Image (spheres, grey):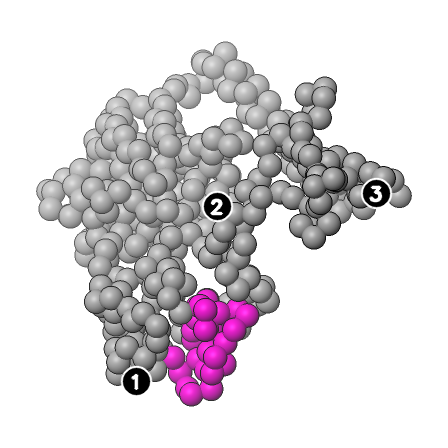
Amino acid sequence: MSVSRRTVTPDSPHDAHIRIASLQVCAAAIGLLTILLQGSPSAAATEASDESQISLQSQVLPILKRNCLKCHGVSKKEGQLQLHSAIRIWKGGESGLAVVAANPSQSLLWTHVEQNKMPPEKPLNEQEKRILHDWIAEGAEGLPKSDAEAESMRQDEHCAFTRIHPAEPPAARIAYGIALHDFDNSSSTPGGNILIDGDPAGGATVHVNYPGPSSTHAGNIGAESYVAGRSFGVRITHLPEHRFRLEHLVDALPEGRHVDLSEKDLPDGSFGFGFCCNRSFQVDDVVIEVSGSGASDSQNGTVVQAWQAELQRRQAEIKSIAAEIPKLQAAEPGRIAWITDSTAAPPEVFLLDRGEYSQPKDQVEPAPISVLNDAQNPMEISLPAGGFQSSGRRLAWARWVTKPDS
């Protein structure tokens, strides 16, 4: 996952009436602006994240799935031990806990791997052993820390399938800043370094002169949650007596609470993002706009109001259509129904190793039941005439089973 970063130095707050900084993220599949709260930031953009911590999902589970699930998977669980998911590893087996966080010597999984008892046919190589040992020693990231967390994971897990997770955990917050003049509190410029810390629970926290002991909490803005599928930002309006109002923008419209700042809070500076604490997100674009807000600029105000009204109308239309989708999906087909392929190219189908979707084996070619497919009555598959989006397999099957003497 790549991170696009564009740093812009806007005009001085003495000259700008309204300043809009908008975070926009694009999802190409549906053409909407989104913030993708998963994936990994580029190495250059990560400033304070802990890159050494070993991940259960991206490093440990692949090792276990390659080597251990034949005996300790979904369908077969020797010693009542399953290793295909975090909750099952945490639960352990009939001999005790497989993993004791931060204590490899007390972890049965590690002691058996270290002694080459697991897996019995082909022990793990040294690199795989080191990853497993260090993961446990670091605290076994990804396993539940309490019975309540384990219960939540258990409810998320389907009986025969492993839930799909991103390679890294989603970002807890989306942090961006305005009026930035340093990144380590080393500048003599007072004020500035305004951090807007977007919260998935709703709104954003505003800190002035961040970071350092002189940092102050200016208040909270907005109420909407920072989630994928929206465009977020802030708007600064120049008020009388050199005051400036900081408002939260969602999809280009102000919403929720606001914070008033003083002139000294907004020195000349730039725009930037905050990467720390294992946060990761993808940003497609940054837009900074300046426009007048004088009472004489009635034409500009009319245009903005018309644009906002049209945006709200379209958003309401989208919500109305989206609300109908579950009803259509829930509708049962009538007494007579038909199905067809979505494409002429048949999908690839594989045999599964002990029913594990993560371990496909040989590819299966389309064919009738081999014991019934004799030389006199072969099942011949061909694309149907008329350019239909179909592989022709269903029609070939229907013709084969209804053929005389088949």
Left/right placement of residue 86 relative to residue 2 reads right
Residue where numbered disc 2 is placed: 227
Left/right placement of residue 97 relative to residue 324 reads left
Residue drawn where x is 23% and y is 27% of the image: 9
Q: Earlier in the sequence, mark 1 or mark 3?
A: 1
Name the element at disc 2.
loop
Q: Earlier in the sequence, mark 3 or mark 2?
A: 2
The answer to which of 278 and 65 lies nearer the viewer is: 65
Q: Which residues are magenta?
A: 69-98
The answer to which of 46 and 205 lies nearer the viewer is: 46
Residue drawn where x is 46% and y is 46% of the image: 226
Query: Which of labels 2 and 1 is toward the front?
Result: 1
User: Is 29 situated above or below 135?
Assistant: above
Name the element at disc 1.
helix
Residue drawn where x is 59% and y is 67% of the image: 159
Left/right placement of residue 139 relative to residue 396 reads left
The amino acid type found where label 3 is placed reads Asp
Name the element at disc 3.
loop
Q: Is residue 96 magenta?
A: yes
The amino acid type found where label 1 is placed reads Gln
Badge 1 density bin: few <14, some 14–19, many ≥20, Cα 10 Å: some
Residue where numbered disc 3 is placed: 405
Q: Residue 210 at what x, y percent from top left?
A: 23, 48
Q: Earlier in the sequence, mark 2 or mark 1?
A: 1
Q: Which mark is residue 106?
A: 1
User: Is 207 situated above or below 27?
Assistant: below
